[in-house]
Amino acid sequence: MNCEVCQLKELEVESFEIREVLRCILHTIVFHRALGLIRPKDVDLELFDITYVQCGEIEVEKKIDDRIDHFIAWIDKHPNNKKPQLCVSFYKAKSKQPWYSSKTDRSFWERWFINLNVVMDLGDASEARSCRRKQLEQSLQQVLFQIIKFVNEKKDHVPPINEGREIYCPFEITIPSSSDSSFGNGMWKRMLHSGGHPSMIS
């Protein structure tokens, strides 16, 4: 199965902005890969003049918040890593499994890489913070447009939708962990295992 890859524009963020920025991006990606009947929910960002849409599914919100918590915890433990990366992978579960296997075989068909550049906190009354905040807002809007452009242009690789109760495409959010220094290498090995060479878009 062909696996498309989207490298999103790098965003320069202060540590307290990470959670809100990631919620906006992750929910936007998942919303645009919704399968069936959903209950869209508009969400206004507190730090930026931007509104994004969620699927309105409790399970999705919980999963995204959980992975963001892990991601922020990892960043706190690795302050020297100023350019962390988060990956959202959509997959199709293979139905035919050996009777003795308890592991779900996943065929990945799309991956999104969210790239951050974590900068030093500038202080509440800093003019530099105000200027940088405006730049981040514009960059975040560009990322949202990049997501929409990708989903509109890249459709051939999306697997057929089976009639069922699934509301959104199955996905996982991968973060680097303190015990996995080869995060990037492992990701590419899994990508190759899923079949085909990914095509890149920037």
Image (tube, rainbow, N blue to C red):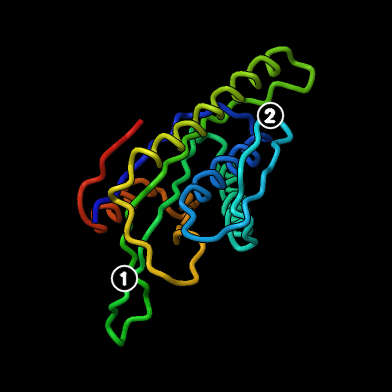
Residue furthest out toward the top: 127
Residue furthest out toward the right: 125
Q: Which residue is mark 2?
A: 48
Q: Is residue 177 left or right of residue 127?
A: left
Q: Residue at x 59, y 26 (%)?
A: 119
Q: Is residue 168 left or right of residue 7?
A: right
24 above or below 66?
A: above
Residue 77 picture quarter? top right
Q: Residue at x 48, y 33 (%)?
A: 83
The secondary element bearing badge 1 is classed as loop
- Give the crowd class for mark 2: few <14, some 14-19, many >=20 residues within 10 Å: some
Q: Residue at x 35, y 63 (%)?
A: 92
User: Where is residue 41 drawn, in percent x and y?
Assistant: 66, 49
The secondary element bearing badge 2 is classed as loop
44 above or below 121?
A: below
Per the model, the C-alpha gap separating discs 1 and 2 is 41 Å
Instruction: Say what amino acid the circle numbered 1 marks.
Output: Lys
Q: Are marks 1 and 2 in contact (CB under 8 Å)?
A: no
Which corner quadrant holds the C terminus?
A: top left
- For the residue pair 43 and 102, the one nearer the viewer reads as 43
Which corner quadrant holds the N terminus?
A: bottom left
Instruction: Say what amino acid the circle numbered 2 marks.
Output: Phe
User: Where is residue 61 drawn, in percent x and y?
Assistant: 62, 56
User: Where is residue 197 drawn, in percent x and y?
Assistant: 21, 47
- Which of the marked residues, 1 or 2, is nearer the chain's N terminus? 2
Residue furthest out toward the bottom: 99
Residue 43 picture quarter? top right
165 above or below 185?
A: below
Q: Residue at x 65, y 36 (%)?
A: 51
Q: Is residue 173 left or right of residue 75?
A: left
- Give the crowd class for mark 1: few <14, some 14-19, many >=20 residues within 10 Å: few
Q: Which residue is mark 1?
A: 94
